[in-house]
Image (tube, helix red, strand yellow):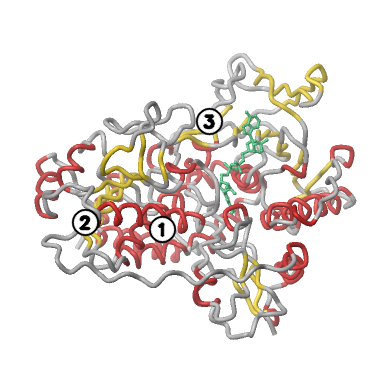
Amino acid sequence: MTFIITQSCCNDASCVAVCPVDCIHPAPDDPDFATAEMLYINPDECIDCGACVPACPVSAVHADSELPEHLSDYAQINADYFTWVGDIPFPAAPPPAGPKVQDQEAPLRVAVVGSGPAGWFVTEELAATRRADVEITVIDRLATPHGLVRHGVAPDHLGTKDASVMFDTIARHKSTTVRLNVEVGKDITHDDLLQHHHAVVYATGAAVGRTLGVPGEDLPGSYSAAEFVTWYNGEPDHVDLAPALDHERAVIIGNGNVALDMARLLLLSPDHLHESSDMAPYAIDGLRESAIREVVLVGRRGPEHAAFTTPELLALINNPDIDVIVDPAELTSLADIDDSERTAATYAASQKVALLRRVAETAPTGAKRLVLRFGLTPQEIVGEERATAIALARTNDPSDVETIDAGLILRATGYRSTAVDGVPFDEESGRFANDGGRVTDPESGELVARVYTTGWAKRGPSGVIGTNRTCAVETATAVVDDYYEGRLADTVGDKDAFDALLTERGVAIVDLVAWKRLDSHERAEGKAIGRPRLKISDRAEQIRIGAEQ
Ligand code: NAP
């Protein structure tokens, strides 16, 4: 028997850490780790110990004998990876952990701004350091934690959302204080944080959609993924979007996993979403009225460069309620790959092209349609009072323009982070310039003392949830190194002083206990009507329920 990693793999490598025979790759030490779509178990080396199963925070690992039918392709997908990349060199042993510093008078105090995956992974790393006693304040502008896990991950990916259980466990660590409903730049300033902490880590993600720069982009009916995804996920600031769902066709620009998520949710039946997702109730009601029968997903490059991952494409292909349509004429061939190019990335590209060929040969069933188009670049979103069509040109022949009628145009072309007053920000890349997690001034390149970043705010909007773990290790190490080597402030205000400041500013603090009350309430209300969770999207109500005794 062997174990197999499947669709919801989050790449956080918890499984790698517990595997006694090093049979899970790419591991964080492998050069391919950062670009891998998922991790794979080598069936020839797995000793069937099962240690990886409970270690996985998103239940992605199954025994081959218990592999659910809809995940059956993953036995081959895991095995083929090792055939594709060949021998994997044995990693060097890590250096032994250094001794803890015992002579510190006061603990190292770190503010982590952002309670999404990046914030929790850096908190976990800081709390686990053996080199200092640490106090961490985790701050979020929303009254609920978990960032993208609550407001970005597709509501029907409940396995991925299980990562929140791991994050709640990190939050309960004695070194950690959770302060939600606190907005830096509004309730408190960056300087306030520095006065009460030795270091500030910005784990603020990337919440704003990138623009295309084409005419018509701002027409009603044209939205960024940042707006649409937070709408169906019930983020308090986006509940009023009211997207246009009254035309039979929607077009999505970009073909990453966010594009696939939005397409799938537009096409799945609202009854299915009611039972099997935590989509906001008003969004399910909106989708019940939807006229959309076809979603066209537009990639500007060829299929071998498609940004979606194989597991997400495979899940759509295996969904009987959706016909995936590909024009064989748009399926370019993969160039011959020599042995030096046999990486996790080329493995994924070859799988995608093979799967798309399978799709091109499959007859549609008459279900709702997801049409995958390739090699088309947006020219204009057409319409007067609202978007009614999109003009696209062949990327390799801009004179060849086609116009597709649609009532809803969604841009899934990446995200930008948001600047914070008082902290240098790189407007061009849309994130904090940094050197291994230490924030730098984008103009001068100089380090900004005591300011750090991690996650999408640090490296841009790429990677899955677990990618943030290795990113956080680097940032946490930088913070502790700087503390250890005397590069942080000598004295800072303590926990009580920080809470007193929040109270003085009139902040209604939401702590971990309040969040867990709301969490239990949402789960119980959901259970009562056959749903995994009944999300509350009104901030005042969230705070009220959290405060109930
Ligand atoms: P993404 O994977 O980077 O995809 C962005 C897409 O937008 C690409 O197809 C890109 O094309 C296209 N694009 C960018 N600028 C464009 C322009 N000016 N005109 C036309 N097309 C343009 O981003 P994402 O989908 O937002 O996902 C972000 C990250 O979250 C990814 O790492 C993703 O895997 C992850 N994620 C994972 C899951 C999951 O595991 N289920 C779900 C959601 C998100 P080019 O490639 O040609 O630049």
- How much space separates mark 1 and mark 2, taking CA atoms? 34 Å
* Disc 2 crowd, CA 10 A, few/some/many (<14, 14-19, 20+): some
Vertical arrangement, residue 348 with respect to residue 326, above or below: below
Label 3 lies in ligand 1 vicinity (Cβ under 8 Å): yes
Nearer to us: label 3 or label 2: 3
- Is residue 535 among what the camera can see? no
User: Residue 547, which numbered label?
Assistant: 2
Q: Position of residue 317 (x, y in %)?
A: 76, 55
Which quarter shows the N terminus?
A: bottom right
User: Residue 21, which numbered label?
Assistant: none
On screen, residue 350 versus residue 426, left or right, reads right
| Residue beneath disc 3 | 210
Amino acid type, mark 1: Val
Element under disc 2: helix
On screen, residue 223 versus residue 148, left or right, reads right
Q: Position of residue 504 (x, y in %)?
A: 9, 42
Residue 37 or residue 216, whichever sits in front: 37
Total tally of numbered discs in the picture: 3
Marks 3 and 2: CB-CB under 8 Å?
no
Q: Position of residue 237 (x, y in %)?
A: 38, 37
Q: Quadrant of residue 377?
A: top right
On screen, residue 39 versus residue 526, left or right, reads right
Q: Position of residue 496 (x, y in %)?
A: 10, 54
- How much space separates mark 3 and mark 2, taking CA atoms? 37 Å
Residue 472 or residue 262, whichever sits in front: 472
Which quarter shows the C terminus?
A: bottom left
Element under disc 1: helix
Q: Earlier in the sequence, mark 3 or mark 1?
A: 3
Amino acid type, mark 3: Arg
Nearer to us: label 1 or label 2: 1
User: Residue 473, which numbered label?
Assistant: 1
Amino acid type, mark 2: Ala
